[in-house]
Amino acid sequence: MLVALLPGDGIGPEIIAEARRVLEALDLGLGFEEAPVGGSAYKAQGHPLPPRTLDLARRADAILFGAVGDPDCDRLERHLRPEQAILGLRKELGLFANLRPARLFDELLDASALRPEVIRGTDLVIVRELNGDVYFGEKAMRTTADGLREGYDVMSYNEAEVRRIARVGFETARARGGRLCSVDKANVLETSQLWRDVVTEVAAEYPDVALSHMLVDSAAMQLVRDPRQFDVIVTGNLFGDILSDQASMCVGSIGLLPSAALNDAQKGLYEPIHGSAPDIAGQGKANPLATILSAAMMLRYSLAMPEPADRIEAAVAKALAGGARTADLGGTLTAARMTDAVLAAL
Ligand code: NAD
Ligand code: IPM
Ligand code: MN
């Protein structure tokens, strides 16, 4: 099995190196090939997603991705910006289904900015659509007839796109607690009205799953009022992006949330939900657990190795139970020492 390692920018290379140590320690016979992506690829090769990187991503059995984003690149033409690399990979490989689980490790009850009694028992999955929405609609900056600068981004979904992600939501709920909450803004957006209509139609195929609908503004509030009420949330690309960062606070830190981006063939790209964290890059401070847990998801979903995936997750829980904490969790461990704690638990 070939794993493509795409470290990227900022803390990306730091966390990918730690996840690789964990995978190598398991001795699973995986092959690794690395390629540049994001701002570092732009600086070295003139493009954030060079053809050879895309080719490796296509050839590999699975992709482990760090993060992209570099303040030096924020004024580049949009198609050359680091973020286009991850958007391009998602689109080129048809990775439309993004699973973002947020489960609280009991040991971290006190690590969150939220009160322990609010977050106790948090265990939810956000199923985020990843190939459509306002991310991929027509967009531009132009000057109006009155000489005003104007930016626009078109938001749209067609029914086939909604249907396929709705099915992933229902299947995910069926395999868990049997409850699916679809989040939209149907009171204002036509895109969301279609979303709600189609999700409701698909529900007929899943009589065993309890479907509810929630408006996104209310969902943002409910997520921090009582996260336990959620089992699986299915939502569009933009709302899912925002709600998943918010959900990370229900489990202690954004440095903990892994993700899988899957296509119809279970080909997957695995990455932490956080970004390149330029504010802490190069200091050894990054929490590597989101990436290590993403590697576990990779073993489970794309490489058919559920047993080592379970072992990684158990080792992370054990390391945390033993008191291992990076700075984002109120501790002092570097990324390397945190990984040492996971390896010791393995
Ligand atoms: P960010 O997620 O990079 O950082 C937000 C805050 O969380 C920062 O204070 C950071 O230090 C902290 N943080 C993030 N990951 C952490 C970790 N593993 N351990 C400890 N602390 C961590 O979001 P941002 O600052 O808004 O964005 C920075 C750059 O990352 C931008 O260029 C953005 O476009 C990019 N980005 C990329 C991805 C991706 O590659 N998939 C995702 C999100 C943001
Ligand atoms: C994420 C990120 C990306 C997104 C950016 C970097 C394009 O925020 O993976 O959550 O918005 O999808
Ligand atoms: Mn995001």
Image (cartoon, rainbow, N blue to C red):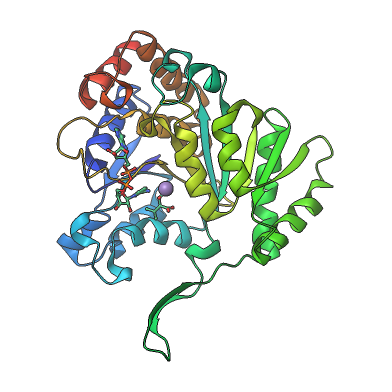
Res 207 → quadrant: top right
Quadrant of the frame with the C terminus: top left
**Residue shown at 66% from the left, 43% from the top:** 169
Res 162 → quadrant: bottom right
Q: Is residue 339 placed above or below 8 in the rendered structure?
A: above
**x and y, in percent, of residue 318 in the image:** 40, 11
Q: Is residue 340 placed above or below 168 in the rendered structure?
A: above
Quadrant of the frame with the N terminus: top left
Residue 267 is at least partly visible in this image = no
**Residue shown at 29% from the left, 29% from the top:** 287
192 or 287: nearer the eye? 192
**x and y, in percent, of residue 243 in the image:** 51, 43
Q: Is residue 9 left or right of residue 210?
A: left
Residue 284 is at least partly visible in this image = yes
Q: Residue furthest bottom?
A: 145
Q: Is residue 113 left or right of residue 307?
A: left
**x and y, in percent, of residue 252 in the image:** 42, 25
Q: Is residue 125 placed above or below 153 in the rendered structure?
A: above
**x and y, in percent, of residue 29 in the image:** 35, 30
118 or 63: nearer the eye? 118
**Residue shown at 32% from the left, 69% from the top:** 78
**Residue shown at 44% from the left, 40% from the top:** 245
Res 289 → quadrant: top left
